[in-house]
Every structure is written in structure tokens, then in C-alpha cells.
Image (cartoon, grey):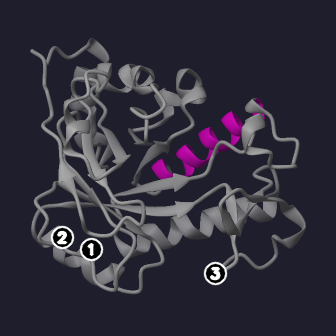
Amino acid sequence: MKLSAVAWFLLLVEPVLGRWNPHVGTTFQIQYSQSTTDLSVHADAFDLDLDDPKLSSYIHTLHSQGKHVICYFSAGTWENYRDDVAGTQHDLGNTLEDWPDERWWDIRASSVRHVITKRLDRAKSMGCDAVDPDNVDGYTPENRSGLGLTKSDTISFLTWMSDQAHSRGMSIGLKNAIGLIPSVESHFDFAVNEQCLKYNECDAYQRFLDHNKAVFHIEYTTSQSRCDDQDRLDGMTTVLKHTNLNNWRIECHINLVG
């Protein structure tokens, strides 16, 4: 794969920045369910839930194997089963469709940002190499957050959160939010996408790939034929997963174009 001048610059400054920056070709596993995470999967990076009670042990084991850990949390929604959301009850919007335990958060509120900073502190203290903040597209009409969030509000929130993660020495991924890629890609170190093949949106991630930033792509299917889909971009790291994100995984071949 030919690297742009920006990509070569990122490769040179990474040791100075002191944080992990996953490049094109980095392999990954994502698992949030089941009582025990399968650490035997052959992958360079593991995307795990920040609230997993065994996370510290997993991080220690994976680091000893030279692997990296991406820690997941929801940055744009209140989840009634999380222990750290007290004080944000006045900053809630509508319930998410298909997710009755979640409501949209007003990401402009200082109380919400306080929770996010505490989560980032916890991720840093536990040894997370990166964070994967989810549900950051509450501004879109189809999500009907009920909070009057704007695209500008979301860009401000994302750049703030990126600065917060970087100041703690962690990298940060952009989760979905395809419409914001032109505005915020420069602030993010990699991308995590769900279902861009299904929705014919994979081309939007070329900007990340051009800058040698990994695109961790998940398709929810049991058919390996999705690996051969011609709309999958060269350079994307694609895995097929069940929707419950257990340890089941099929890794698609990564096409690196020279």
C-alpha cells in the first residue's frame, strides 16, 4: 500500500506521542458478551467493554502477549445498568429504538462530560491502549434523540473527547457517525464501523485508510460470502460477528494494495 505524506508523518511521530496508533492491516477481535472472553483468538487488538469485571486481568494477559486493548463505552447514551450515571437524570432524551435500557444523553451538558472524563480516567488507570466511544450520532433525524442536538454540537463533543483521550496517552476511535468523518477524521486515530456493507457506506472510510489509520469493520452475518463483497474497501479489517458480540468470529482477508 502506498502511504501518503500524512501517513508517513504519523508513523514518524508515534513514538514521540507515546500512544498506540493502529495502522492499516491491524487485526482485531470484538467481544462484549459471554462470561469469559476468549483471549486465544489470533488478533493484534481486542475491543472489550470497559465495565467487564475481568478487564484488568484481560489487559494484563493481552499486554504480556504484545497485544493491545480498546475499551468500549457508550458516550452518547445513558444506560440504566451502568453504575456511574448518577447526576445525569436531567440530561436525558428519548429511549433508543430497539434498546429499551438506553436513552440519549445531552452531550452538551457538563454532568455528562464529567461522566465521560471519569470513564477515560478509569480506562487509563486500567491500562487501556485506546477507547471506543459509541452512540455519538444522536444529532441525526433518524435517531430522534429529542434533545435538539446539532451536527456542530456533536463535532464539538467529539473533538473535546478526542483531546481528553489523547491527553491521557490513549488513542480514540470514531464509532460509525459516517456523516462526521470529513469534519473529525483528523482528530481520531482509527475507526470502528458496523454494517457499512449492508448500508453501502464503506467508501466513506477511504479518508482513514489514506492516512494509514485502521478501519475495524464489523458485519453482522453468518455468511462468509460477505468477505468477498466487492464494496469492501481494500485495507479495511473486516470481521463477521453475531449480533450479541460473543466470541464467534470470521476474519476476512485484508487486501493491502501496493
From the viewer's perspective, is the residue at label 3 or at label 1 nearer?
3
- First in sequence: mark 3 vs mark 1: 1
Q: Amino acid at mark 2?
A: Leu
Q: Residues within 10 Å of mark 1 (few under 14, many from 20)?
A: many
Q: Picture coordinates of residue 104 (x, y %)? A: 75, 57
**Does the residue at mark 2 contact the one at mark 1 (Cβ under 8 Å)?**
yes
Q: Which residue is mark 2?
A: 62
What secondary structure is found at the residue carrying circle 1? helix
Q: Amino acid at mark 3?
A: Tyr
| Cα distance in 3D space between marks 3 and 1 | 23 Å
**Does the residue at mark 3 contact the one at mark 2 (Cβ under 8 Å)?**
no
Q: Residue at x 39, y 75 (%)?
A: 33
Is 160 one of the magenta-colored residues? yes
Q: Picture coordinates of residue 206 (x, y %)? A: 36, 20
From the viewer's perspective, is the residue at label 3 or at label 2 nearer?
3
Q: What's drawn in magenta, residue-wise?
A: 152-166
Q: Residue at x 27, y 83 (%)?
A: 57
| Cα distance in 3D space between marks 3 and 2 | 27 Å
Residue 59 image label: 1
Q: Which residue is mark 3?
A: 81
